[in-house]
Image (cartoon, rainbow, N blue to C red):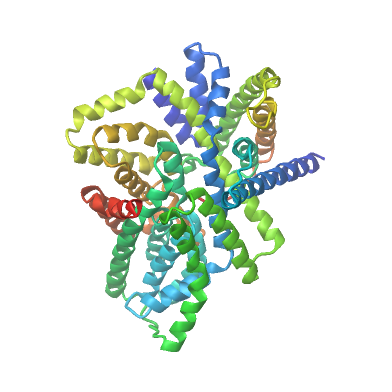
Amino acid sequence: MIIAILVTFFTLLFLGMPIAFTIGLVSMGALLFSGVSLEILIQRMFAGVNNFSYLALPLFILAGNIMGKGGLTKRLMALADAIVGRFAGGLGMTAVVTSAFFGAVSGSTVATTYAVGSVIVPRMKEQRYSNSFIASIIGPAGVLGLIIPPSITMVILGITANISIGKLFIAGFLPGLLLTIAFCIYVSYMSKKQGYGVVETRKLSGKEFWKVCKEAFFPLMSPIFILGGIFSGLVTATEAAVIAVVYGFILSLFYKELNMRVFKDIMANSAVTSAIILIIISFANAFTYVLTANRIPAMISEFFLKMAHTPLQFLLIVSVILLVLGTLTEVTSLIILLSPIFMPIALSYGIDPIHFGMVLIMNFALANITPPVGLSLIAGCSITDRKMGIENTFPYVLHVIGIVAFVVLIIIFVPSISTALPNLFSKG
Amino acid sequence: MLSNITSWIVKVITALCILVITGLTLIVFVQVFSRFIKYSLPGTEELARLLVIWLTFLGTSLAIHEKMHLGVRYFVGLANVKFQKIIDRVIYAVTIGMFAVIAVYGFKLTMATMNTTSSTLQLPMGLFYIVIPISAIFSIYFIILNIIDPDPSHQGEASL
């Protein structure tokens, strides 16, 4: 039965069937085979989304979408440019730092790549950065949107693995900073070596710098509101999302970048984006029933107990599993299917749930950029050149994957990077 | 004729989705506000659950039309175009079968729960369930459209 489930699952998945329907169909088949009424399928699907806390998901997606289309990117880029633009490979670093800023106002990976890429890629081409380098930077830099709070991926992880979303947000701050710095060092080194971005390096006068800071002030107030609200315990993560929606809406009215038509499109796109995640959660709840009936979570747990004797070994094995699955499948469904199974095992090893959550998040970031199936890398290619394939990103993408993998290891070995800030704020 | 019906259906579902997401925003907004004036509105939690369920299933149908569902297209992309077309049709056919089953059993469950009411708002529980068979039928309709007219340029982008 287990083998039949796995074989059918991967066959349908690799034949291009949407992941939600693959999960649904496999569940349906397994229920039929074990002679359970299919009413169970509908009931489990229903129960899977009949949850009040899930409304955080559409709200964060909406907030991120409004921020993305509201003309904030240009202002954030100007600030990033003013800070790192003067150094060797300045524009490349600007791309990284803008992505980090954008990650702090939006919670999305691909949207970060598209929003930042659409403004900065043409300029990078002018300054003779090679296409393969641009795609290898602008795509992976998008995962900063996933690590730096707010983060839609963290919202999904929070609701499926039952971890505090607010604490995950706070925990993502330092790892995000670490990865931003690592990316910048790499970009600077590589640009110097390859002679990228030497056409112009600009230094701003004090007056110009002040103007740029003023322009970026209101966009950057958004993360301060969101995170400040959550850190201080004044509002829940969900409520913070609504504040971000309202703030982003007012801001874009102020910048005159939104009209009613665009706004309607944003609402509809956010609704559908939420639905494609919620339907995976819904079908996955039926799938969990099938898995549990076949004792699969228990077997996974036994496997770990046999293989891993220390928490560290457990985290490393989980990372290897996610690395392999991450190259082949899409990340959101991995979170929804695997984190509820892994979480109790991690707790039995005595691992801090926030630390474990952060290790998962970093692995998902890595899975987003590993070819052949990496959403962020694909986005990076398509924004650089419509006809560009992921095979054209070598060798740079391998360096970037190495950097992210290295940061994943740091996060695994040094739990305090993830837990220090959440502990600090939960005491106060 | 067919395209008129389609665009009308898409318009209605889109409008409903926009309505739902606006409703969710308002609910949380009201919740924050009511905490400040220390008066809690009953039933907001239940209403939010109803809206999330409707959003899930209506949005799923719409995502089929916009071709936005997440999947792994890489390996099929390696095959030649003719073979891809055959695979796509098989997948579509199987998916239609799945939604047909969901429609039938979803409808049964809706009928069975019409007479029970929800705890705070006293809404018939069938109202929570009915979106499942409705969306299944729309999904089948959109999949059939995709089979008749597989337009590869029409590809929506999820903002994940």
Residue reaching furthest to the top: A35
Please name the residue shown 58% across and 57% down the image. A245
| Screen quadrant of the N terminus of chain A | top left
Rendered view: A225 above or below A13: below
User: Split into 4 quadrants, where in the image is the C terminus of chain A?
Assistant: bottom left
Callout count: 0
Q: In the image, residue A43 lies at what x, y percent? A: 56, 23
Asked if residue A205 shows in the view, the reply is: no
- In depth, the one of A82 and A127 nearer the eye is A82
Q: Quadrant of residue B45?
A: top right
| Residue A48 higher or lower than A406, as above or below | above
On screen, residue A200 versus residue A301, left or right, reads: right
Please, which residue is most extreme toward the right here?
B1
Give the left or right position of residue A424, taking residue A63 as reference: left
Query: Looking at the picture, how far across and down is residue B12, in whole percent?
Result: 75, 43
Residue visible at 41% across and 61% down in the picture: A135
Please indicate whether residue A186 sits to the left or right of residue A57 in the image: left
Q: Is residue A343 left or right of residue A307?
A: right
In this view of the protein, which residue sits in the foreground, A68 or B34? B34
Residue at (30% x, 23% y) in the render? A299
Q: From this viewpoint, which residue is outermost toward the left?
A: A309
Looking at the picture, does residue B104 appear above or below residue A352? above
Instruction: Residue A206 in the image: state x and y as whole percent.
Output: 41, 87
Q: Quadrant of residue B66?
A: top right
User: Is there any visible trace of residue A324 in the rendered image?
Assistant: yes
Quick check: B21 above or below A88?
above
State the residue in front, B112 or A77.
B112
Between residue A82 and residue A367, name the one nearer to us: A82
Residue B101, position as x, y percentages in the image: 62, 21
